[in-house]
Amino acid sequence: MRFFRQACCTILAISLFHFGRSNEANAASTDRVERERKRLEELFIWKMSEELKLSVDTEISFTEALRALNREKAAARLELNDALFSLNQVSGSLRGKESGLTRPAKSSVDAIRLYEKAMRRYGEIPVREVARLKPILGPEGLARYLVAKSRVTDKLLSISTSGNPLVD
């Protein structure tokens, strides 16, 4: 069981690393990233269902809610990436002022507004997660979920940053 858990966490860490680089990838790589994202999502749902010991009915509702939240998170992440791209374009144009490239100040203001809006949207997702999962899991189940999610996230971060295998 320990080996399986270590293998799952290693797959999660590798998937997270590759998912974060999806904007740099071509179309074939984007398909691979999407498959990895789905596999990561399934693995996370399985791990949380196991940790929380969910009934079949509860697991179905839980899975649907998490998938919907993940779609929202992906859309918010794309919006944030678009805003960062706009900021990069504006700041690149402003840096190139010496070479004759100019950008009206309004463009940078607009780019910052887009970024602020995208950050607010992305930041609201954890609040919506709690609101959606509380009726499904109940207060005690939600508390266990949040602790388990934090523990899994911490383990994944430690694996991805240290390169050391997971030790329980």
Image (cartoon, rainbow, N blue to C red):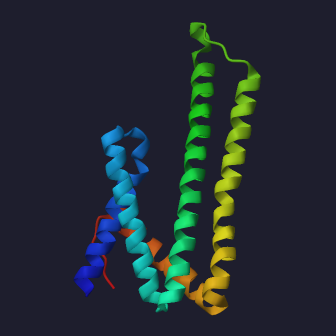
User: Viewer-proximal residue, 44 or 123?
Assistant: 44
Where does the image place residue 78, in percent across and percent down from the top left?
A: 55, 46
Quadrant of residue 90 within the rendered picture: top right
From the viewer's perspective, tell me whether residue 96 is left or right of residue 135: left
User: Viewer-proximal residue, 41 or 19?
Assistant: 41
Task: Identify the residue at the far left of this view.
Answer: 3
Task: Identify the residue at the far top of this view.
Answer: 100
**Residue drawn at (42%, 73%), measured in percent from left and top?**
44
Task: Indicate the quadrant containing the N terminus: top left, top right, bottom left or bottom right.
Answer: bottom left
From the viewer's perspective, tell me whether residue 43 is left or right of residue 63: left
Task: Indicate the quadrant containing the C terminus: top left, top right, bottom left or bottom right.
Answer: bottom left
Q: Is residue 14 above or below residue 115?
A: below
Q: Is residue 167 above or below residue 157?
A: below
Where does the image place residue 21, in percent across and percent down from the top left?
A: 40, 47
Quadrant of residue 136 within the rendered picture: bottom right
Where does the image place residue 38, in percent across and percent down from the top left?
A: 39, 62
From the viewer's perspective, tell me whether residue 26 is left or right of residue 60: left
**Residue drawn at (75%, 22%), measured in percent from left and top?**
105
**Residue drawn at (68%, 68%), measured in percent from left and top?**
128
Where does the image place residue 46, in percent across and percent down from the top left?
A: 40, 79
Q: Is residue 83 above or below residue 158?
A: above
User: Viewer-proximal residue, 23 or 112?
Assistant: 23
